[in-house]
Amino acid sequence: MESSIECISSIDGMDEDEISHPHPFSLFSSPKPSHNNINNNNLNGGVINPATSVHELLECPVCTNSMYPPIHQCHNGHTLCSTCKIRVHNRCPTCRQELGDIRCLALEKVAESLELPCKYFSLGCPEIFPYYSKLKHEALCNFRPYNCPYAGSECSVVGDIPYLVTHLRDDHKVDMHSGCTFNHRYVKSNPRDVENATWMLTVFHCFGQYFCLHFEAFQLGMAPVYMAFLRFMGDEMDARNYSYSLEVGGNGRKLIWEGTPRSIRDSHRKVRDSHDGLVIQRNMALFFSGGERKELKLRVTGRIWKEQQSPDGACIPNVCS
């Protein structure tokens, strides 16, 4: 069984100065030493080791994450978070004494009085939040790193967009193209045998942004389907400024899809399973292929454009040349 895909573009690759410089991505700050040895008397008396910041006191010594109520402590005053209390089987990881069910209420009160910067401040987030609101913000922060959009493996790499573009090119060997039009040809010698899933990824650079074009075959029920869709390398709000179209056809027939690219904040599987893209059933794909339907030959073309607002509020498509 053989399959191949070819991308034809007006410009054969991306300019070196656009993506050739590695962008080492270091997530947040380096781990800090933990000085998590306190008791209620220390806090109530207002005495804290000068070398130990309050933020470090709120750092769990096991997982090193910030602690949120309930914060537990042993009889000797060593604290840890509720998740790690279960992991250490109710034994203090510092002195090995049984933890019991003692809450460190003083430390919880201290946490309520704190205002801290978002942990993504080094990536550009300027916000400061009360301690107990910070976690909720960070889960949705626009400056949080992106997951690698590569669909062919469970890649755990995270980073900003320039770093991920370099990662896709150098580590995943993804094809890179400049321009906002594309022309893909997908050929498969045995269209009745579909691995779940066969996937292709190409990155396009236009309007100063990066887009991921996915094309894949996968099993839907008992029959294979073919699907193409576009994802925007950025946040959802920015993705709404762009639109794209996909077209596939043959034998005097064609299917056209138009939509808004999904942000890579949405996982590849989430987009695919929502069928938010051009979906081609096998029988239709074979009809487009022509011949005796023994070989699949699909040509998918498309374009990306940026929506612009006219003075009267109407959207005007801006297609790059």
Image (cartoon, helix red, strand yellow):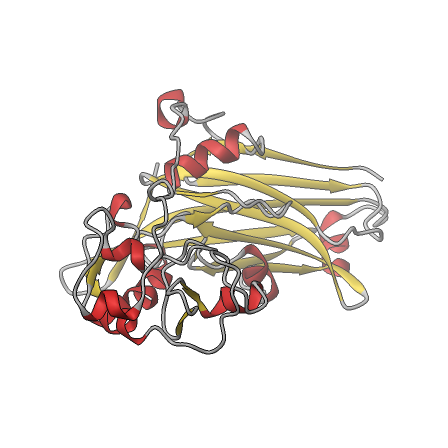
The one nearer the camera, 169 or 28, is 28
248 is higher (above) or lower (below) than 19: below
When asked about the image quadrant of residue 313, the answer is bottom left
Residue extending farthest to the top is 16
Find residue 39 and report its horizontal and vertical position in percent.
31, 66
Q: Most extreme residue toward the left, as rendered?
A: 311
Q: How many marks?
A: 0
Query: Which image quadrant: the N terminus?
Result: top right
Which residue is at a point 34% across and 51% down the rendered structure image?
35
Position of residue 26 in the picture relative to residue 151 (left or right): left
Q: Nearer the viewer, residue 188 or 117?
A: 117
34 or 207: which is nearer to us? 34
**Residue 199 in view (yes/no):** yes
Note whether 72 is above or below 24 in the view shown: below
Residue nearest the viewer, comparing 136 with 131:
131
Q: Is residue 243 left or right of residue 115?
A: right
Q: Quadrant of residue 260?
A: bottom left
Q: From the viewer's perspective, is residue 11 above or below residue 299?
A: above
Q: Is residue 118 visible?
A: no
Res 134 → quadrant:
bottom left
Question: Which residue: 59% across, 59% down?
Answer: 269
**Residue 61 coordinates in the image, percent (x, y):** 43, 55
Q: Is residue 53 above or below residue 188?
A: below
- Compared across the picture, whether 25 is left or right of 57 comes to right
Q: Residue at x 58, y 34 (%)?
A: 172
**Which quadrant, please, contains the C terminus?**
top left
- Residue 190: x and y in percent read 84, 46
* Residue 318 spot, x, y in % from top left: 30, 48
